[in-house]
Image (tube, rainbow, N blue to C red):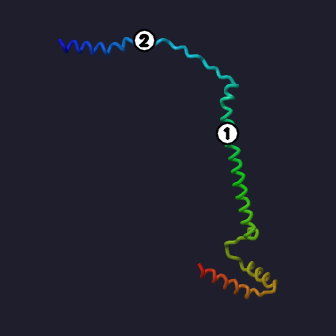
């Protein structure tokens, strides 16, 4: 008998919350929110301002980087004597013209070449 009373009491304790809930729940009439263009403009104005600020900062950085690159390329071009940097060997005609130009300035081409070879060898020895 005790077991049946305990079982009935436990069943009553578990079933009481089930009857306390209204089922099915009543229909909730949710209010409609109408967004007009003024409300959307006010809500998105901060987003537009931040996009403008990011764009201005990006353009400023682009201008700085472009000017640094341009100035450095101009200086590099000026330091290589107008961009006449050559990596290949000269032809015989170019060598003759170069010797003629060197001899026109008073110093013989052989002496100048010997000096350049001496300086070049010294530079390679240091490395």
Q: Position of residue 64 (x, y in %)?
A: 71, 54
| Residue with the mark numbered 2 | 22
Q: Position of residue 121 (x, y in %)?
A: 63, 83
Please give the name of the residue rendered at 34% of the width and 13% of the height, measured from the top-left corner.
16
Q: Quadrant of the N terminus?
A: top left
User: In the picture, residue 24 is in which quadrant?
Assistant: top left
Please give the name of the residue rendered at 52% of the width and 14% of the height, measured from the top-left corner.
28
Q: Position of residue 53 (x, y in %)?
A: 69, 42
In the image, 10 versus 108, the foreground residue is 10
| Residue with the mark numbered 1 | 51
Please give the name of the residue rendered at 67% of the width and 43% of the height, measured from the top-left corner.
54
In the image, 22 versus 78, the foreground residue is 22
Q: Is residue 1 above or below residue 107?
A: above
Tell me if mark 2 has few (under 14), some (14-19) or many (20+) residues whose alpha carbon lies within 10 angstroms of its own. few
**SS of the residue under disc 2:** loop
Residues at badges 2 and 1 in contact (C-beta under 8 Å)?
no
In the image, 123 versus 22, the foreground residue is 22
- Determine the CA span between mark 2 and mark 1: 50 Å
**SS of the residue under disc 1:** helix
């Amino acid at each position: 008998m005790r077991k049946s009373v305990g079982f009935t009491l436990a069943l009553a304790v578990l079933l009481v919350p089930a009857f306390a809930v209204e089922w099915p729940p009543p229909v909730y009439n949710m209010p409609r929110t109408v967004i007009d263009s003024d409300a959307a403009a006010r809500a998105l104005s901060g987003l537009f301002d931040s996009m403008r600020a990011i764009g201005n900062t990006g353009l400023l950085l682009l201008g700085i980087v472009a000017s640094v690159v341009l100035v450095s390329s101009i200086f590099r071009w000026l330091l290589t004597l107008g961009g006449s940097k050559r990596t290949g060997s000269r032809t015989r005609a170019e060598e003759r013209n170069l010797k003629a130009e060197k001899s026109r300035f008073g110093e013989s081409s052989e002496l100048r070449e010997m000096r350049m070879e001496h300086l070049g060898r010294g530079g390679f020895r240091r490395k």
